[in-house]
Image: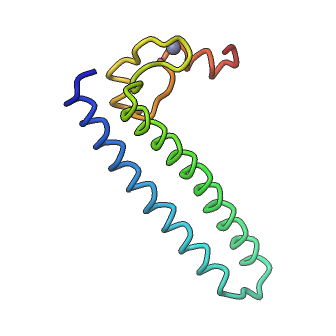
Amino acid sequence: MRRTELDRFRKRLEAKRHQVQELVQAARTTESQHGDTETPDLGDRATDAFNREVSYSVRITERDLVRRIDRALGQIENGTYGKCVSCKKTIHKARLTAVPWARYCIECQELLDRGEL
Ligand SMILES: [Zn+2]
């Protein structure tokens, strides 16, 4: 992949990373606000617990995404970016444009999703 293209993906990844971290931050803020208020009603408490659960799972997903983004950024640095970690083939540009942190080519990803890899 050309340097200019790599730079473009790096910028996309960095922008996404920033965006995700703001989401994580927002979820954390919501969580602490919930923790501060004592809700006497049981119904409210259930909703509260549910909301906490949701923001918690958001943070897990987003954290995982940050890890993937960091890994992709590392691959850009060491020159392995855009290669499938399984079959070593070049991942299609359209796929990288849609999912810049993709580690598998579409064929391997499909096998993985079916549990065959
Ligand atoms: Zn592959």
Q: Where is residue 57 in the image (x, y as percent from the top left)?
A: 64, 55
Whether residue 113 sits left or right of residue 29 in the image: it is: right
Whether residue 44 sits left or right of residue 42 in the image: it is: left
Vertical position of residue 21 compared to residue 2: above or below: below
Quadrant for the N terminus in the image:
top left
The quarter of the picture where residue 116 lies is top right
Vertical position of residue 116 compared to residue 69: above or below: above
The quarter of the picture where residue 74 lies is top left
> Which residue is most to the right?
42
Which scheme is used to colour this image of the protein?
rainbow
The quarter of the picture where residue 86 lies is top right
Q: Residue at x 65, y 61 (%)?
A: 56
> Which residue is most to the left?
4
Quadrant for the C terminus in the image:
top right
Compare residues 29 and 80 and report the one nearer the observer: 80
Compare residues 62 and 3 and report the one nearer the observer: 3
Q: Residue at x 77, y 88 (%)?
A: 40
Q: Where is residue 85 in the image (x, y as percent from the top left)?
A: 53, 20
Q: How many marks?
A: 0
Q: Residue at x 67, y 80 (%)?
A: 35
Q: Residue at x 72, y 88 (%)?
A: 38
